[in-house]
Image (cartoon, grey):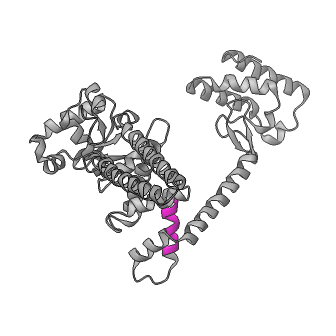
Amino acid sequence: MRYSIFEYSQEKLISFGLDITDALLLNWFANFFCGRMEKQIFKDGNGNSKVFGWIKTSKIIEDLPVLEITSEKGIQKRLNAFVEKGLLERQILNTQKGKKSYYRTTILYESLINTSIKQNEEKKDNSIKLNHADKTESNESSQGNSGYHADKTESNESSQSNSGYHAQSNCGRHPQGNSSYHAISNSLINDNLIKDTAANILACTEKHFGQSIFDSEFDKKAAAYLIKNNIQDINDIEGYFIFLKKILYSKKTVINLRGLAYKLFFEPDIIAEFIKSKQTELKKKDELEKRKIVCPCCGTFFLSENLECPECNLQVSDFTDIYQIEKHKQIVKLSPEDKKNYLSELEKIYFCKPLTQMLHLTSEEKLKIKQMEDELNIKYGITG
């Protein structure tokens, strides 16, 4: 049995109930996604940014007439199956022209890729190295002219044999299809990283500079460059584009905006300056974090300069008062309507007189106010 169809394990394709048409569709998507496919960034449930590519079913029919699928419903049925099997994720975007479906591959999709090809290559390469080592050792141990000629003849025969082996090894080394085998033969993590980074770069390029401002290979070259400089997160990538735009706009006269933007993107001094500014920003954030305090009522972190918690409104002056903390926790748990009524009634108790008079209350007046507050707490089920 042939191990691979395109770069996919034939055994895995069968286990997922996929046929040759499905394999070609997935191969088309993987290649087009790395190219000029329209991208859109969506947030997942954890708030992480993910890049999806828009699949236009009519484009598939146009690109792959060999499938002999002439209806968009036929294509959509297979895409739906990929989503149901967990091989693709889908996001739908409502636009003025209608709904657009965006897709991205999943970790389950990566399991389709035949990684055993790479392992076989490594075994063959190791065999070649051992063959060369044995040949060298044989030459060094030979003595006399007759021995030398005999070994030389044997060495030549071995060389010819190895030459044929290389040709045979290289033949069929690359799986069929347009996908780059060298990219697939790298670790899946690196492959995914390059794909995602390139897609993020393409999305940021179109957002900040417009479509087709750079050459078609820009996203891949830029991805390798940014990964080398440890810039991979979508926020950092977009930050670099914004940083470049600020530099460009600071120039009084720019004859060739495209050329200058391209040059600055790959300029070592520019990216070094960006990394430095990013580190400075992170340092400032760390300093702010150190100045933050935690609310003992709701657990919110905020700057100590604030007089009360921005989330639950507990006064900072009460942070060490266990009674006030427990009381405030119960107030926070009240329904929105009860909480509103409670605070309104409490305000009437403490501001029944002008502030100047409240500051000079007698002991009897203070006791009366305390009793009124206790009655209010009982009314709303707030215990001391």
- Horizontal side of 132 relative to 57 (left or right) equals right
Quadrant into which the C terminus falls = top right
- Horizontal side of 257 relative to 95 (left or right) equals right
Magenta part of the chain: 239-248
**Residue 245 within the segment the image draws in magenta:** yes
Where is residue 319 drawn, in percent x and y? 79, 33
Residue occupying image coordinates x 50% and y 36%: 46
Where is residue 298 drawn, in percent x and y? 67, 31
- Horizontal side of 60 relative to 186 (left or right) equals left
Quadrant into which the N terminus falls = top left
Number of numbered discs overlaid on the protein picture:
0
**Residue 235 within the segment the image draws in magenta:** no
Q: Quadrant of residue 262?
A: bottom left
Where is residue 297 drawn, in percent x and y? 71, 29
Q: In which quarter of the image is residue 119?
A: top left
Residue sticking out furthest to the right: 363
Q: Can see residue 247?
A: yes
Q: Is residue 238 above or below residue 373?
A: below
Secondary structure mainly formed by the magenta segment = helix
Residue occupying image coordinates x 29% and y 45%: 175
State the residue in front, 116 or 335: 116
State the residue in front, 376 or 228: 228
Q: Quadrant of residue 316?
A: top right
State the residue in front, 133 or 22: 133
Q: Can see residue 51?
A: no
Where is residue 32 drawn, in percent x and y? 28, 51
